[in-house]
Image: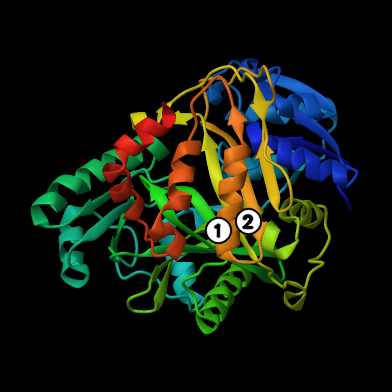
C-alpha cells in the first residue's frame, strides 16, 4: 500500500525536504502552517495548505487536534512529523494511528521505549550494546543518587529521563556541585517535559559524539554508517560529517552492528539514529540514546551513500519491506553539513530574524543547500532559528573542507546576520582540519575567538 496523500506536520526546511521527497514518489502533499507561515516556502510547494492556528507553536504546530482535523479535511492518509515539534511524541503517533492514518515513523510504543532515556539504556544493555556507567534506572531521589556516586565518581552527569535537546542536564565535579545541581536538573526536566525523572551517567572526558543511521521495517534493519557530531555548542550540534575520521574499520563495524542489533531488538520501523559517546583514549563507545525520527543532519549520510532516507521512510510507512540489503550500502567520499542559523555568533548567538534581501545560493559539484529561503521572505521570530543546511561532498575530508569554504564564500543572505562567519573560521582552524575535536572543544574555542567572530560580522 503506497501512500496517496501525505500531510507534513512541520515547517521550515524539513517540511520542504519531505514535500519534495513525497512528490518524487508521486504522493500528493498537504502543508499545515501557522498564521505566521502563510507565505512560507513549504506552503507554496505543497499541493494543498491548511492554516492550523496562531503563530505560537503550542497553538499550531503542537496542536494535535488541529493537525488531525486538517488531515481529515484534506483526505490525507498519512502524516510525517519531520523532526522537532511532535516528531517524538508517542501520544501523537498513537492518535494518528487511532484516526486510521499512517504515522511515518516508529510506533508509539517504540517511541515511548526509546524516548525514555532509562528504558532506552535498558533496551541497549539487553541487546548487548555498551552503555555509559551510571544508574541502572531512574534515580528515586537524591539519597539514592548519592549512593550511585560511589560507582560513577566525579565528574557525573545528571540527565532528564524524558525529552532531549540538552535540557534537564547538569554536570557536577564534586559533592557540593552535585547537591546544588540535582534539584536544578529535576526542576528543569519537570518544566520542559512534564516529567522530573532523572538518571545519572559518568562523564566521559574529551568524548566524541558519533551516531549511526539505521533504517528498519519492523522486522529487519540495516545501518547506513556513522556520522560524527562532536562540534557542539551547549550540547547542540552545529557541524556534522560522515564518516568519522576517528574510527578504525574494525571499530566502525562493531559500532554500526550494535546499532542494527538494537533496532532489530525493538522492532524499529522507519529512519532512526542511535547515538554514542566515543572515548578515543580508551577506544570504547557507549550508547547514550536513540532518536526515533529523521535527523537534522541526515543529508550527510545521503551524500555518502546515495540513499534518500526520507523516501525510504515513506516507502516503509506505505507498507513496503526494506528494499535495501546491508551489502547495498557502500559509502563513498566524505560529506560535511553546517547549520546556517539566523543568529549572531558575535553576540552569543542572539536570534536575528529579519527579511531576506538579496540572496545568492552556493552551487556546483558536490554542493547541496536545503533551505526554506527565498528573496523577500520574512523570517518569523517564533520558531527555531535554522534557515538552511549547507552540505558538501568530496572524495576526501580535506577536499570536503575546501569545498565547504568555497560554498560558504558563495553564500550571501542579505538582511540578517547568520552563523556563516563561524563556519568559515572553523573550516580554517587547524584542530578542526585535523579532526581532533571533542564535544566540549567548541565552547573553549568560542571563548577564545569572540573578537574574531565580531570582526567577521562587521
Which quadrant does the C terminus fall into? top left
Mark 1 → mark 2, Cα distance in angstroms: 6 Å
> With 382 as the anchor, is 61 left or right in this view?
right
> With 47 as the anchor, is 81 left or right in this view?
left
Q: Which percent across, then down, holds residue 228? A: 50, 61
- SS label for mark 1: strand
Q: Quadrant of residue 413?
A: top right
Question: Sequence order check: which comes first, mark 1 or mark 2?
Answer: 1
Q: Which percent across, then down, holds residue 210? A: 48, 64
Q: Answer whether labels 1 and 2 touch (C-beta < 8 Å).
A: yes
Disc 2: which residue? 300
From this view, report whether residue 224 is shown above or below residue 441: below
Residue located at (79% from left, 69% from top): 324
Residue located at (65% from left, 42% from top): 82
From this view, report whether residue 51 is shown above or below residue 315: above
Crowding at mark 2 (Cα within 10 Å: few <14, some 14-19, many 20+): many
Disc 1: which residue? 241
Q: Quadrant of residue 202?
A: bottom left
Q: Which percent across, then down, holds residue 382? A: 51, 22
Amino acid at each position: 500500500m503506497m501512500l496517496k496523500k501525505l500531510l507534513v506536520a512541520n515547517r521550515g526546511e524539513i517540511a520542504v525536504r519531505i514535500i519534495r521527497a513525497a512528490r518524487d514518489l508521486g504522493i500528493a502533499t498537504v502543508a499545515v502552517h501557522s498564521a505566521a507561515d502563510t507565505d512560507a516556502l513549504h506552503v507554496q510547494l505543497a499541493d494543498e495548505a491548511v492554516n492550523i492556528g496562531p503563530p505560537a507553536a503550542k497553538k499550531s504546530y503542537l496542536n494535535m487536534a488541529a493537525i488531525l482535523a486538517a488531515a481529515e479535511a484534506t483526505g490525507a492518509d498519512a502524516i510525517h512529523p519531520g523532526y522537532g515539534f511532535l516528531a517524538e511524541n508517542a501520544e501523537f503517533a498513537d492518535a494518528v494511528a487511532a484516526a486510521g492514518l499512517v504515522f511515518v515513523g516508529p510506533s508509539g510504543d517504540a517511541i515511548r521505549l526509546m524516548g525514555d532515556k532509562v528504558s532506552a539504556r535498558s533496551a541497549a544493555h539487553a541487546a548487548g550494546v555498551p552503555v555509559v556507567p551510571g544508574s541502572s534506572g531512574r534515580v528515586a531521589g537524591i539519597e539514592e543518587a548519592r549512593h550511585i556516586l560511589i560507582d560513577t565518581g566525579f565528574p557525573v552527569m545528571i540527565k532528564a529521563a524524558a525529552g532531549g535537546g540538552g535540557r534537564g542536564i547538569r554536570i557536577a565535579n564534586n559533592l557540593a556541585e552535585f547537591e546544588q545541581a540535582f534539584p536544578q536538573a529535576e526542576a528543569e526536566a519537570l518544566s520542559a517535559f512534564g516529567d522530573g525523572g532523572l538518571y545519572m551517567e559518568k562523564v566521559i572526558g574529551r568524548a566524541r559524539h558519533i551516531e549511526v543511521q539505521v533504517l528498519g521495517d519492523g522486522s529487519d534493519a540495516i545501518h547506513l554508517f556513522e556520522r560524527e557530531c562532536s562540534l557542539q555548542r551547549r550540547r547542540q550540534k552545529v557541524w556534522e560529517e560522515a564518516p568519522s575520521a576517528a574510527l578504525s574499520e574494525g571499530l566502525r563495524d562493531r559500532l554500526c552492528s550494535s546499532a542494527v542489533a538494537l533496532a532489530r531488538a525493538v522492532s524499529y520501523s522507519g529512519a532512526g539514529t542511535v547515538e554514542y559517546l566515543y572515548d578515543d583514549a580508551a577506544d570504547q563507545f557507549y550508547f547514550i540514546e536513540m532518536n526515533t525520527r529523521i535527523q537534522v543532519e541526515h543529508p550527510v549520510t545521503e551524500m555518502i551513500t546515495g540513499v534518500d532516507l526520507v523516501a525510504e521512510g515513506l516507502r516503509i510507512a506505505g507498507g513496503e519491506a526494506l528494499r535495501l540489503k546491508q551489502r547495498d550500502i557502500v559509502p563513498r567520499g566524505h560529506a560535511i553539513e553546517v547549520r546556517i542559523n539566523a543568529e549572531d555568533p558575535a553576540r552569543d548567538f542572539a536570534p536575528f530574524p529579519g527579511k531576506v534581501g538579496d540572496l545568492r545560493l552556493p552551487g556546483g559539484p558536490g554542493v547541496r543547500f536545503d533551505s526554506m529561503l527565498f528573496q523577500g521572505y520574512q523570517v518569523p521570530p517564533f520558531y527555531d532559528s535554522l534557515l538552511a543546511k549547507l552540505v558538501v561532498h568530496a572524495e576526501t575530508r580535506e577536499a570536503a573542507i575546501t569545498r565547504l569554504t568555497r560554498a560558504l564564500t558563495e553564500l550571501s543572505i542579505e538582511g540578517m546576520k547568520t552563523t556563516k562567519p563561524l563556519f568559515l573560521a572553523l573550516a580554517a582552524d587547524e584542530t578542526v582540519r585535523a579532526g581532533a575535536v571533542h564535544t566540549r572543544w567548541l565552547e573553549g574555542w568560542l571563548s577564545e575567538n569572540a573578537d574574531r567572530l565580531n570582526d567577521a560580522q562587521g
